[in-house]
Amino acid sequence: MGYFPGMSLRWGPPDGRFWNPPVQTLSHDELRRLQLERLGHALERIWTRPIPFFRRKLEAAHLTPADIRSLADLAAIPVTVKDELRASEREVPPFGDYRGARLEDCVRVGASTGTSGRPTYILWTRRDLEVDDEAACRGRYRWGLRAGMSCAHAHPFGLYGGGWHFSHGLEALGVLNVPLGPPATAAQVDDAVEVWRRVRPAEVRLFGNAAAKFSEGARRRGLDPARDLGLTVAGEDPRAQYRTVSAGLEALGMLGTACAEADGAHVCEDLAIVEILDRRTRRPVGDGERGVLVITTLEKDNLMLRYDLEDVVRTNYRPCPCGETHVRLFWEGRAKDIVPVAGRELLPIDVALALATVPDLTGTVPEYQIVRRRADDGRLHLRVELTPVAQETGFRGAVERVVRERLGVATDLRVVPPGTLPRFDFKAARVVDAQP
Ligand SMILES: [Zn+2]
């Protein structure tokens, strides 16, 4: 392979605190210099490769690579949205003209999850996979995973699979990868339980309902999930959402994870420039304010230039006591899940954090669903499952009170019996649109 020294991603061996200590502790100024240098390479690639889609964007704004002399100049480049990638894929078969590498130089194809319309395709060269793996290694290392340990997960595989990405990141770190796959059938659950029993993974990463299904499967086989698998099914702590932040598989799947401070997820600023913009004005928001995540990938062959992920995030630019210098982000949710209530813009995480404070629920959250009305009638329309621990009488009042106190809005609450609302093996869809 043989990359130029300037293109090397890892500048030193792990030191117990960081996977890539020299890079993860760069000073603010050094980090900005590195970003600018790498942005220069990306712009050069757009011209010389060429990458027609992004070149058109720059030319439409009357820009050449020479015009981008500082990171502030980046703001002059128009933002790209997913619909434009879809159009490019439609018009220039087979995969559009926004690719930074020739198809014959790519080694993997995937599809974005397509939660908002037709999915787009993702291509990786070997170099792109190296960038993804580097980011993933830092992320897992922050969680305390080390070579020789093991990690089980239930990510899906196939075209829409984050499973490949998660798996390769673990393997690059030297961790034993235990890819259980989603618990779709009883046979799959049985197989997963058997390998789980043998390995007893140090870390288990499950979404939504998967833990309950594996737990059930273990009992079916006469095992005690806690004793034999180390698996306890607890209600989800909504703050767990802040442990990771992704820039989508199309940009940088593992953008970052939280360190032990648990005050936002450190992102890889040497591999991506993150901008947080107001979703309407596209102007930068202040530190700690919500905005949409716009990503420019650095060091990738199939690069992205100012790509709007339609994800809502906020930053934490305070210096972190852990010593890592890269900015921390909180992933707040998808822009498509914003629910306007009484002039405010609420996301499922707001509701989950409020519900977690209902007395008797001990920090965990009951199953809930937000019904979005076509017109904002000033109330949050909420369905919540009554959990066995909650008493009917106090529960309704407590939910209404915490929503009013924490979110400042009135609730139209429907308490429903346990098992009424849909369950999800992967990421939960909490917002449904009211039928007209
Ligand atoms: Zn930290």
Image: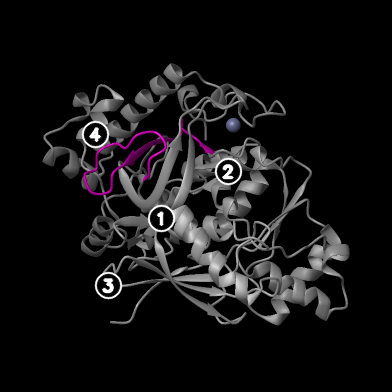
Q: Position of residue 372 (x, y in %)?
A: 36, 70
Among numbered discs 2 and 1, the one appearing first in the sequence: 2
> Would residue 44 be counted in the magenta stretch?
no
The crowding category of the residue bearing disc 3, from other C-alpha atoms within 10 Å (few below 14, some 14 to 19, many at least 20), is few
Q: CA distance from mark 3 to mark 4?
A: 34 Å
**Which residue is the site of mark 1?**
408
Identify the disc placed on residue 75.
4
Q: Could you tell me the amino acid type at mark 2?
A: Ala
Q: Could you tell me the amino acid type at mark 1?
A: Gly
Q: Secondary structure at mark 2?
A: helix
Q: Could you tell me the amino acid type at mark 4?
A: Ala
Q: CA distance from mark 2 to mark 1?
A: 38 Å
**Which residue is the site of mark 2?**
136
- Dot 2 beta carbon under 8 Å from ligand 1: no
Residue 364 appears in which quarter of the rendering? Answer: bottom right
Residue at image point 56% right, 22% down: 25
Q: Could you tell me the amino acid type at mark 3?
A: Arg
* Front residue of this view, candidates 365 and 70: 365
Q: Position of residue 75 (x, y in %)?
A: 24, 34
- Considering the whole magenta stretch, tell me its main secondary structure: loop
Q: Which circle, 4 or 2, is nearer the viewer?
A: 4
Q: Which residues are magenta?
A: 265-290
Q: CA distance from mark 4 to mark 2?
A: 28 Å
Residue at image point 72% right, 80% down: 187
**Which residue is the site of mark 3?**
374
